[in-house]
Every structure is written in structure tokens, then in C-alpha cells.
Amino acid sequence: MSKIVKLRNKEVKIKMPWMPAKRIELSEKEKTILSKLSEGTHTQLHLKIRAKIIIMASENISSNAISKELNILHGTVRRWRNRYIAQNGEIREVESKTPHKMRGTIERILSDEQRPGSPAIFNDHQVAAIIAMSCESPEKFDLPFSHWTPELLQIEAIKLGIVDSISVRQIGRFLKRERFATAQESVLVES
């Protein structure tokens, strides 16, 4: 590993000391669980790869060799090696107090952390009001048609002030999620 530093208005490449990765010590129970995860036919791929990383790291294989062997990025190997080491205390505690929970603990440690998504645009009350409106007859709203379409629901939801704006596609998602359906085209009521 090297680093470029500026000395007397000149850039100089300095060789940095190499830090070996920390070794992971696994108990027999951990090895068994990780082996089952890495070889399981019904194990999710990300868990298989991460279990292989931990097993290989416990065999004193370098992060570079692991990344080449598994065809993954070096940073990925480092991240999961460090995360597993950081949770070592918890693993030891679970193993000594509740060994039957070991597999679940290891799977949780090797799983992705929850990531926050974007906040919801429509609250539950707005969604419920749109769905409730779709269950009512348009005639109840003094409209000249007998069936709702997503377009008509969009126009009426905005007109009634349920939402400031909404796409026709979003109305369709609400109805699909709740297994409701509207007519593809509006049917005018005969006068």
C-alpha cells in the first residue's frame, strides 16, 4: 500500500506499512453453522458468500486471496470480516447462554442492515379514502358514469381535496395492492 504526499512542493510516493487483516477464531459450532450456510441449497446467495468469507478468513487466508477466489471486491471481504469480528462478543455470549439461537444470530450478523427508504408520499388516511371512494358508486358523487376508472378516481380525489396531486398509476397501485379493480373505460349512465 502506498500513499502520495506533498513534500517541498513535490509529490512523493511513500510506502505505507502493510497491516494484516485480523484473524477470526471460530468455535466448532460456528464452523458447523457457517459451513451449512455456505453449502446450503436453500440458503440465500448473499448469506452463502458471506459465510464463505468468514470461513476462509478463519483459515488465515488473506482478504486479497478471498476476494480473488470468490470473485468479489476486496472492500466487501474487509467489511464482512470486520463486521463479524465486531460482533464476536455477542456470538460468544449467545453460544454460552443460548446455543440453540446461534444460527439465527449468525444469520442476522451476516444479513444486510435495514436501509431507510424515501418517506411515504401518501398517508394511510389518504389511501383509505381513495379506496373507499372506489367502493362507492360514482353516482353517489353526482357523476354521470356508472364505474370508476383510475383516471376518474384521480380527478375526483384531487377535486375532493383528498390529495393535492396523484398519478393515475399510483391510484392503480393502491387498488392493485388491495385487490380492487376499476373498469378500463368509463361507462356513461344513460339519461
Image: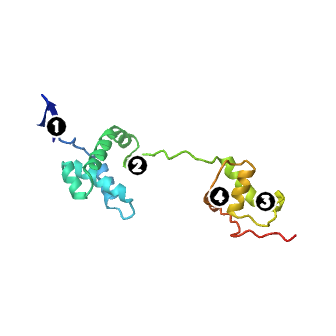
Amino acid, disc 2: Asp
* Sequence order check, earlier mark of 3 and 1: 1
Q: In this view, does 185 lie to the left or right of 86?
A: right
Q: Which mark is residue 112?
A: 2
Q: Residue 4 carries which label?
A: 1
Marked residue nearer the N-terminal end (4 or 1): 1
The quadrant in which residue 48 appears is: bottom left
Tell us which disc is closer to us: 2 or 4.
4
Q: Position of residue 104 (x, y in %)?
A: 41, 49
Circle number at residue 25: none
Report the Cα–Cα distance between label 4 and label 1. Answer: 56 Å
**Camera-side mark, 3 or 1:** 1
What x and y, as percent, mark residue 121? 59, 47
Q: Residue type at mark 1: give it.
A: Ile
Q: Which residue lies furthest to the front in this view?
A: 9
Q: Is mark 3 on a helix, strand or loop?
A: loop
Which residue does the numbered mark 4 point to in the structure image?
A: 171
Classify residue 142 as left or right of residue 60: right
Please report the residue visible at 64 percent of the width from the left and 46 percent of the height from the top: 123
Give whichever of discs 2 and 4 has the lower sequence position: 2
Q: Nearer the viewer, mark 1 or mark 2?
A: 1
The Cα–Cα distance between marks 3 and 1, rounded to whole angstroms, is 70 Å
| Mark 3, residue position | 136
